[in-house]
Image (tube, rainbow, N blue to C red):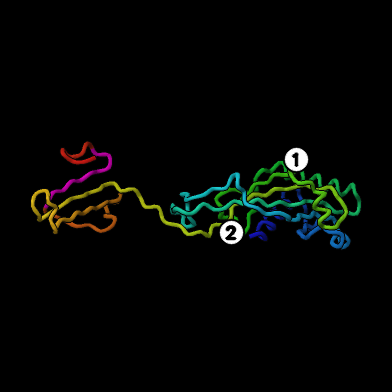
Amino acid sequence: MLQLVDETLEAFLRAEVPLPERDVDIAFEAPDSEWGARITRPTVNLYLWDLRRDVEFDAFGLERRTGRDQNEVWSPALPRMNLRFLVTAWASDIRDEHALLGAVLRALLLAPTVDEAYLTGELVDTQAPMTLVAARPDRKDSADIWSALGGQLKPGLDLLVAITLPDSAPSWQVMPEPSEISFGMDSTGGPGTGGPDSWSWGQAKGADGEADGDSASADGSEAAVEAGAGTAPAGSAS
């Protein structure tokens, strides 16, 4: 799944900044000093350094949604994840680095969500959009990340990418509401005794008139309730 996020971000940046492949590379490796020494072309680096569940906007329980076959289903709510990237620009001249990083920043700030055209693989079928939040002031200081990487401090953007996991949970088809419900009772015992042969039956019909589930017939009392019909027969329980 994470490689699909990488592919989506690369497609987004190349189109929206833009970053032509002939001019600029896009990398996802850890931007430590060893990696930086191998850079020979202008490069935008997106380093994924933190993953955690989004407890603020996460959902729980069952939710009703449209399945892949376009039928409505009940399914467990899919987890939403926050992915944090350190975004840096690399070039031989510091002014080129600043120009490149500024162009990336502008594209990220102007796009709170990633257009579906850039999504790849299973991300196309996710129910919620991929969102982007860049340069939030309440995020961890990037100096701590550079210290952990053992590299030289560089200007960088903190990018928060929120995604819903691709659908792989079990689901149950939503059954249509019945248009008619019939029920009845029959007993061979004495009045009010509910003898040993006492039984009841029921039947529900859908909008197409077809019965849903098993049914039975009886010579005893019977009542029919139609959806939207008037009051129940006298003496019946509500």
Q: Amino acid at mark 1?
A: Pro
The prevailing secondary structure element of the residues shown in magenta is strand
What stretch of residues is rendered in magenta? Answer: 220-229
| Crowdedness near tag 1: few (<14), some (14–19) or many (≥20) residues, C-alpha within 10 Å | few
Q: Residue furthest left?
A: 190
Residue 229 lies, in percent from the top left, at: 24, 39
Who's the residue at 21% across and 50% down the image? 183
Residue 164 lies, in percent from the top left, at: 59, 52
Whether residue 117 appears in this view of the structure is: no
Q: Amino acid at mark 2?
A: Glu
Reading the image, the residue beneath label 2 is: 122
Mark 1 or mark 2, which has the lower sequence index? 2
* 32 horizontally vs 161: left or right: right
Who's the residue at 9% across and 49% down the image? 191
* 191 horizontally vs 232: left or right: left
> Are the residues at dot 1 and dot 2 in contact (C-beta closer than 8 Å)?
no
Query: On the rendered image, what quadrant is the C terminus found in?
Result: top left
Reading the image, the residue beneath label 1 is: 137
Who's the residue at 69% across and 57% down the image? 6
| Crowdedness near tag 2: few (<14), some (14–19) or many (≥20) residues, C-alpha within 10 Å | few
Residue 129 lies, in percent from the top left, at: 60, 48
SS of the residue at dot 1? loop
Could you tell me how far apart the alpha carbons at marks 1 and 2 are, in whole angstroms? Answer: 32 Å
Q: Residue furthest front?
A: 193
Asked where in the image residue 121 lies, by quadrant, the reply is: bottom right
- Taking depth in this image into account, of 52 and 163 the one nearest to the observer is 52
Residue 224 on the magenta segment: yes
Residue 180, numbered label: none
Residue 169 lies, in percent from the top left, at: 51, 59
Please say if 107 is above or below 125: above
SS of the residue at dot 2? helix
